[in-house]
Amino acid sequence: MSVVTVDDILSDLPLGFASLILRPGPSAPAIERFLIVDADDEAVDAGGAFVLLIGVRGRSALPALRRLLKDPPPVVAVKGSRADLAEAEELLLSAGAGLLLVDPGADWDRLLSIAKDRIQPRTYQNEVLTLLEEDLFAIAQTTARLTSSHVVIEDAANKVLAYSTVTNDIDELRKASILARRGPRKYELLLKDLGAYRELHRTRQPVRVPARPQDGLRERVAIALFAGERIMGYIWLQETGEGFGDDVEYVLTGSAARASAELIRYRNQQSVHMREDRVVRLLSGPAEAAASAHSGKIPAERPAALILVGISDADSRADDAALKHGELANLASIHAAAYKPSAVVGQFNGDTAIIVPDLQSSTAEPGLRSLSEAVVRDARKHLGLAAFAAVGPMVPDLLSLHTATRITEALLACAGTAETGGVATVDDFEAEIPYREAVRNFSTSPFRHRSLAALLQADAELAGTLRAYFEASFDVAECARRMKLHKNTVYYRVGKAARVTGLDFGNPRDSLVALLHIQEWAASNHPTGRK
């Protein structure tokens, strides 16, 4: 860590945020770290620390300040007015410590963030920690959205690692935890007295803690984060007024699996550069998949499947599309982890991919479909996204999964243009997939039926009629009804096309040639949805 001065920190603070009313004495140690101190903390090693004294203001800070001066810090930040802190100023002056007066309406998190940036400049370790915090905050926010609750993720020592957006519906325990970035001692003791931690350590399932209005506590659901038999931390959900939904335990189980994986990754101190998308590696081919599966300890010998989740063209073109893709991936990862802890979620060719290894082939497809339906449903409900999904065919092992990518992508394209949207399997579009493949191959070919291509471009009415005629399976009456035309008009236009081009639409080969041209014309003149 680098050595900074209090002036370095002050230079980054917004105007009016805080003022230095007492400079550190000449013999004061340099600032080498930051420290958050709660007024109830008894023994604190404050030497060399920029101290944020929270939970008290003005004169009520004096007892905590006296305890701090057993090992005086370079500077202490306290909220209040200068008049209220006159005695504190005298106390710190005699100890050679500085006093930073913070505006009562200022945000402690803002001051902490600025101090951290100055005191802990970016290093390899900081970069890894930043990535961890970003992932955990995303998990907390997604979990909060899915459960309509407030979420806090703690480490095993009850230090707050991440939390969902703060609202007015949080109780005193959550407020204090977020400010101090750890659970206050008196609440920790209360939760222990209630047996909450004993139950959390005993089971890997969610644990409910009833509300205690007399202590200012709302109802909670919590789960421990395990790595083998070691507890890595906890996720706490606090209800926000309407109680918990029926699926809260299911969602929390998935969130715990995701958060545990992130904590384990950080604990192992994996390189930032190794955070490449494992999905791409697993789908690149047998060699890359084997290496990735081995490093990630993913079972590779049992059947596996690929699920792709897409969003509508409108959502893809929205200004916040990148953000929505990230939120969708977070949502999918929680559902996937609840279904199969070894599942891998990431991006693949612009879509959200879920790789599900270690499957039981006889029972997998209904479960995969249910997983996909849950992701699509919650993406629509909680993210406002027009999402749809494709459940690709199962392959015998993870190393063969790359063979299913093309058909799964083709299936996703079918699901995206289907009127119902939702979730699709190969059985739903068995004939549609090879047909679309034929159209796609035709579009890349330089060969065209010259007179038919020219006719379609020159006469839009005739082209539209031919399209409707083919879609009506050559039924003139049905075509006329759909286009609101007289049957004779349809007969005339179809006959003209056959006469000009020399094609016989009753001949399978000629009708296939015509259909490919018509679909190309429709795609370029009347694009609808995702292709």
Image (cartoon, rainbow, N blue to C red):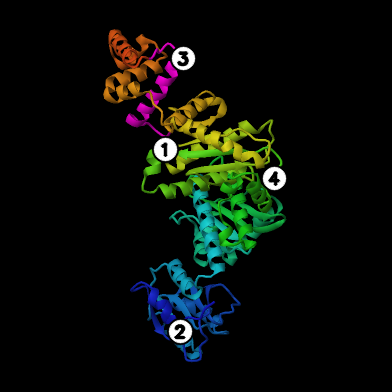
Judged from the image, the secondary structure of the residue bearing numbered disc 3 is: helix
The residue where tag 4 is placed is: 299
Q: Is residue 457 left or right of residue 519?
A: left
Residue at 33%, 73% (x, y): give it. Answer: 15
The residue where tag 1 is placed is 312
Give the amino acid type for the residue marked by disc 3 in the picture: Pro
- Residue flagged by tag 4: what amino acid is it? Pro
Distance between the Cα atoms at labels 3 and 1? 35 Å
Q: Is residue 514 magenta?
A: yes
Q: Nearer the viewer, residue 388 or 75?
A: 388
Q: Is residue 349 above or below residue 113?
A: above
- Give the mark nearer the N terminus: 3 vs 4: 4
Spot occupied by residue 50 in the image (x, y as percentages of width and height): 50, 78
Mark linked to residue 98:
2
Q: Secondary structure at mark 2?
A: strand
Sequence-wise, the earlier of marks 4 and 1 is 4
Q: Earlier in the sequence, mark 3 or mark 1?
A: 1
Of marks 2 and 3, which one's residue comes earlier in the chain? 2
- The CA distance from mark 4 to mark 1 is 33 Å
Could you tell me how many numbered marks the image carries? 4
Specify start and end residues of the magenta stretch as a single range: 503-531
Marks 2/1 in contact by CB < 8 Å: the verdict is no
Dot 3 alpha-carbon crowd within 10 angstroms: few under 14, some 14 to 19, many 20 or more:
few
